[in-house]
Image (cartoon, rainbow, N blue to C red):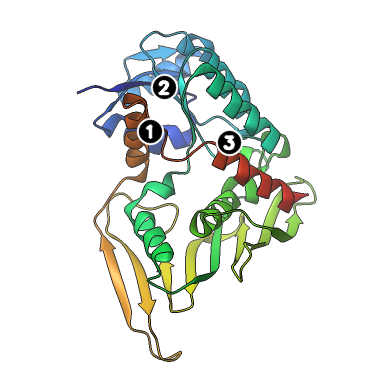
């Protein structure tokens, strides 16, 4: 079976704990190398995950002939530099979200990959999980009537000033870290871009990052999305999708576990607030990171478009900019 050979740029936790093992488990993928800014750390990571090659610099990995694609879980402010360098080296790129620090920077990345003839995709893994595939299909099919509103919440607690997610220069803050999901899912469900954006942003007075952000996105034709994201609250996440004839609730929309069944609840044709003819749809355990890797790799092998056009990342970044402006 043909496979895509992957290199991992950085030993970041998300890569070590979730994404790289998922790529290794994908049938059409093989991880051949991992790089860090020091050979000792790279070698330790390679040994831990059973990766054959370790590189003491990102440049060395990009020069490796047995790497077809790279996964980039670097800090947000480093995404553009290393995506463009990977493109120039002829490597396909799966880059963590948000794709860049600005929409202009994201567009530069898209253009660089297009000019080099390599694939680029932002790593919004949730889009590929069976729960979301089904929820989007139901929302767009009329199963709950005409889609009218989306409400979503995403939170966790992190006030560590040394943590990169709390540093402005590295692209930290609630909206860049987790609120980007709320924006992405809204645009996905409504299959379009907001025509009007209103927001409320509370910032940490010392760190300067947004710590509690709410947004209202107007998609026109009586369609709205409202969300809140915060990194100063207990860990919680939920998505509610409302139509003229029903609603959908997604229990765990983002950090979807790989080892248990997941559920969405679909309520349709209720006659009143106390009448809830709800169907619970159960999905077997699935790894959204593995599915993402398999779909991205298959696009490379088939010389086909990636599952999510990189232009989507530019559009998502434009909404982020508007909310934070």
Of circles 1 and 3, the one toward us is 1
Say few, some or many: other residues with alpha carbon within 10 Å of mark 1 (under 14 / 14 to 19 / 20 or more): many
**Residue 99 image label:** 3
**Residue 69 image label:** 2
Residue farthest to the left, as pictured: 1
User: How far across and down, in percent of the image, does residue 269 sit?
Assistant: 38, 83
SS assignment at label 1: helix
Above or below for 62 versus 139: above
User: Counting residues from the N terminus, which is met first, the one under dot 1 or under dot 3?
Assistant: 3
Is the Cβ of the residue at disc 1 closer than 8 Å to that at disc 2? yes
Q: CA distance from mark 2 to mark 3?
A: 16 Å
Residue at position x 64%, y 32% from top? 107
User: Counting residues from the N terminus, which is met first, the one under dot 1 or under dot 2?
Assistant: 2
User: Counting residues from the N terminus, which is met first, the one under dot 2 or under dot 3?
Assistant: 2
Is the Cβ of the residue at disc 1 closer than 8 Å to that at disc 3? no
User: How far across and down, in percent of the image, does residue 192 sit?
Assistant: 56, 54
């Amino acid at each position: 079976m043909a496979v895509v050979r992957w290199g991992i740029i950085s030993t970041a936790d998300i890569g070590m704990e979730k994404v790289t093992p998922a790529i290794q488990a994908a049938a059409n993928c093989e991880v051949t190398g991992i790089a860090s800014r020091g050979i000792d750390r790279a070698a330790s990571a390679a040994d831990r995950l059973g990766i054959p090659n370790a590189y003491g610099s990102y440049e060395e990995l990009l020069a490796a002939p047995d790497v077809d694609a790279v996964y980039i879980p670097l800090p947000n402010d480093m995404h553009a530099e290393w995506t463009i360098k990977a493109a120039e080296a002829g490597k396909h790129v799966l880059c963590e979200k948000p794709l860049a620090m600005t929409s202009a920077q994201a567009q530069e990345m898209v253009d660089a990959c297009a000019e080099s003839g390599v694939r680029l995709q932002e790593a919004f893994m949730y889009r590929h999980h069976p729960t979301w595939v089904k929820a989007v299909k139901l929302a767009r099919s009329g199963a709950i009537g005409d889609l009218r509103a989306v409400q979503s919440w995403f939170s966790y607690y992190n006030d560590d000033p040394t943590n990169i997610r709390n540093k402005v220069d590295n692209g930290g803050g609630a909206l860049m870290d987790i609120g980007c999901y709320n924006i992405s899912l809204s645009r996905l469900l409504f299959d379009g871009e907001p025509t009007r954006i209103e927001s409320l942003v509370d910032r940490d007075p010392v760190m300067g990052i947004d710590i509690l952000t709410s947004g209202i996105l107007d998609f026109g034709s009586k369609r709205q999305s409202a969300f809140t994201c915060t990194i100063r609250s207990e860990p919680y996440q939920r998505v509610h999708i409302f139509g003229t004839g029903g609603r959908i609730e997604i229990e765990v929309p983002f950090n979807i576990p790989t080892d248990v069944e997941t559920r969405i609840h679909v309520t349709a044709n209720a006659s009143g607030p106390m009448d809830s003819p709800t169907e619970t749809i159960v999905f077997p355990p699935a790894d959204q990171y593995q599915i993402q890797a398999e779909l991205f790799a298959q696009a490379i092998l088939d010389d086909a478009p990636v599952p999510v056009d990189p232009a989507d990342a530019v559009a998502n970044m434009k909404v982020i900019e508007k909310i934070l402006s």
